[in-house]
């Protein structure tokens, strides 16, 4: 992903970058966080984090001859391209501020400290913009993976959260800057009413109608 490694550096000011991350929810549902996609996929970090090497605690990330540390890309379009890979389709696109020790690459950085600046994009596996987060059916010890779902695909998926509800469970404030078009409200949504709440009500009504039809058929 990142090429043309340069010398180990220490920045004079923070950098803004873009990356993909899995959204995770604690087992008790009281905390939210993020997990990496490959290296460090078993490590959960919050809105503010300091990298730790998954192989050895003897050095501080990023180490020149090691793959440890946080990663980010300079260009948001490069992060979008990465999100097209099958294994990355359930990830959120987030904007980060990178600081601390870092190693510069052609298209991004590997660095030691980060602060998540915003949640930028969320996409359902069907290709539509995500309207909320549902239980992905996978996870790591103590944490459940969440996956973005659109209004059409949300029916029957457990543990649905809006992106703002997810952000509210993080350890520090993180704004959700998903474009308005990416979170369409279902038809009939009242002003100020949560699209996810309206969607859940519509799903419940649909199930009730299906139960009624089934009872008539059985009779």
Image (cartoon, grey):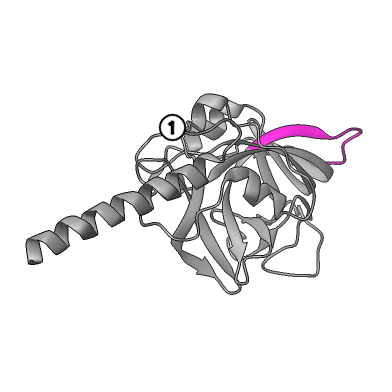
Extreme-right residue of the structure: 12
The image shows residue 79 at horizontal and vertical percentages of 56, 34
**Residue in the image at 57% along x and 30% along y:** 191
**Residue in the image at 35% along x and 45% along y:** 153
**Quadrant holding the C terminus:** bottom left
Count of marks overlaid on the render: 1
Residue 11 in the magenta stretch? The answer is yes
**At numbered mark 1, what does the secondary structure look like: helix, strand or loop?**
loop
Q: Is residue 7 visible?
A: no
Q: Nearer the viewer, residue 191 or 103?
A: 191
Extreme-bottom residue of the structure: 141
**Residue in the image at 36% along x and 57% along y:** 156
Q: Nearer the viewer, residue 151 or 85?
A: 151
Q: Nearer the viewer, residue 75 or 151?
A: 151
User: Where, by quadrant of the figure, is residue 207 drawn?
Assistant: bottom left
**Quadrant holding the N terminus:** top right
The image shows residue 91 at horizontal and vertical percentages of 52, 46
The image shows residue 190 at horizontal and vertical percentages of 53, 33
The image shows residue 2 at horizontal and vertical percentages of 60, 38
Relative placement, left or right, of 106 versus 205 is: right
Task: Please say if 140 is above or below 178.
Answer: below
Per the rendered image, the range of residues in magenta is 6-18
Residue located beneath label 1 in the image: 188
**Residue in the image at 21% along x and 58% along y:** 212
Q: Residues within 10 Å of mark 1 (few under 14, many from 20)?
A: few
């Amino acid at each position: 992903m990142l090429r043309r490694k340069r010398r180990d550096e220490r920045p004079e000011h923070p950098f803004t970058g873009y990356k993909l991350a899995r959204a995770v929810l604690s087992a008790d549902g009281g905390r939210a966080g993020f997990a990496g996609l490959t290296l460090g996929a078993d490590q959960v970090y919050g809105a503010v984090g300091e990298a730790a090497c998954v192989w050895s605690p003897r050095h501080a990330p990023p180490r020149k001859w090691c793959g440890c540390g946080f990663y980010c890309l300079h260009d948001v379009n490069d992060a979008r391209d990465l999100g097209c890979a099958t294994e990355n389709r359930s990830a959120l696109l987030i904007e980060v501020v990178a600081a601390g020790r870092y190693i510069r690459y052609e298209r991004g950085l590997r660095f030691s400290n980060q602060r998540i600046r915003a949640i930028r994009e969320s996409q359902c596996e069907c290709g539509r913009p995500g309207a909320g987060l549902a239980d992905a059916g996978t996870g790591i010890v103590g944490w459940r993976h969440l996956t973005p779902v659109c209004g059409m695909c949300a029916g029957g998926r457990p543990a649905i959260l809006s992106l703002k509800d997810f952000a509210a469970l993080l350890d520090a404030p993180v704004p959700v800057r998903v474009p308005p078009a990416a979170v369409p409200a279902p038809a009939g949504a009242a002003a100020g009413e949560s699209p996810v709440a309206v969607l859940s009500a519509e799903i419940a009504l649909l199930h009730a109608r299906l139960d009624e039809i089934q009872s008539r058929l059985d009779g």
